[in-house]
Image (tube, rainbow, N blue to C red):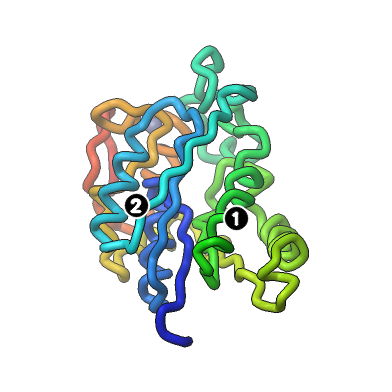
Amino acid sequence: MPAMTRAVVLLSGGLDSTVTMARAKEEGYMLYPLSFDYGQRHKKELECAGKIARYYEAQEHKILKIDLGQIGGSALTDVSIAIPEKRDLEEIGEDIPATYVPDRNTILHTLALGYAEVMKADAIFIGANALDYSGYPDCRPEYFEAFQKVAELGTKAGVEGRAIVIKYPLINMTKAEIVKEGTRLNVPFHLTWSCYYGQEKACGKCDSCLLRMKGFKEAGITDPIEYIKSGGGA
Ligand SMILES: [Zn+2]
């Protein structure tokens, strides 16, 4: 790999995107994390993303503002829609839950593609995961294969034969495998935030908390963040 190879890393401040950031660093890329202030319920994950970007001494941390709340239609952007809680782990992923934000990932990935082209980045790293996930259609491998085509066909860089490579290294990992990978890479788990709520402690009841807790438990590793209810981590 030539020197000064750049990667835009989608950094939400959560577990998966932080492990993905660590992977991009391990592969030798200069890091250009990108976060979105998209009208989500709370800003805590953005604060975490900022801390993680500083931890990794990123070249530049870009936060793009885009108000998906104007479209609404999701529990994450409309406080009048309830966030599902205390679901069975078997239930999670079977249907598309109220926390699905209509077309969010395609909207955000497209913005990342434009940013990556301007920054002359060679790759975009995305921490999507299709195993222990919430059932979102835009987290599946076939979706990312199609998005790679968009990068090849829809950008100047692609037409000129230097298409930006879409990387999604966690796509086939379980949450436990992601936690183990993060441990191998010395990821600062204490800086990450997964909960759909932005309280001082994680709720321990939303799908995102439940999947995270399951991952740490199965990996046999203690989750350093605090939960409101007992039973966080291993
Ligand atoms: Zn939660």
Residue 181 visible in the shown view? no
Residue 139 visible in the shown view? yes
Asked which quadrant contains residue 53, the reply is bottom left
Q: Residue at x 60, y 22 (%)?
A: 70
> Considering only order in the chain, which callout, 1 or 2, is on the residue closer to the N terminus?
1
Are circles 2 and 1 on residues that touch, CB within 8 Å? no
- Give the x, y percent position of residue 44: 32, 34
Q: Could you say whether the residue bearing mark 1 is in a helix, strand or loop?
A: helix
Q: Quadrant for ligand 1?
A: top left
- Give the x, y percent position of residue 76: 51, 27
Q: Which residue is mark 1?
A: 114
Q: Could you say whether the residue bearing mark 2 is in a helix, strand or loop?
A: helix
Beta carbon of the mark 2 residue lies under 8 A of ligand 1: no
- Give the x, y percent position of residue 210: 42, 38
| Viewer-proximal residue among 153 and 149 | 153
- Give the x, y percent position of residue 205: 40, 29
The type of residue carrying mark 1 is: Gly
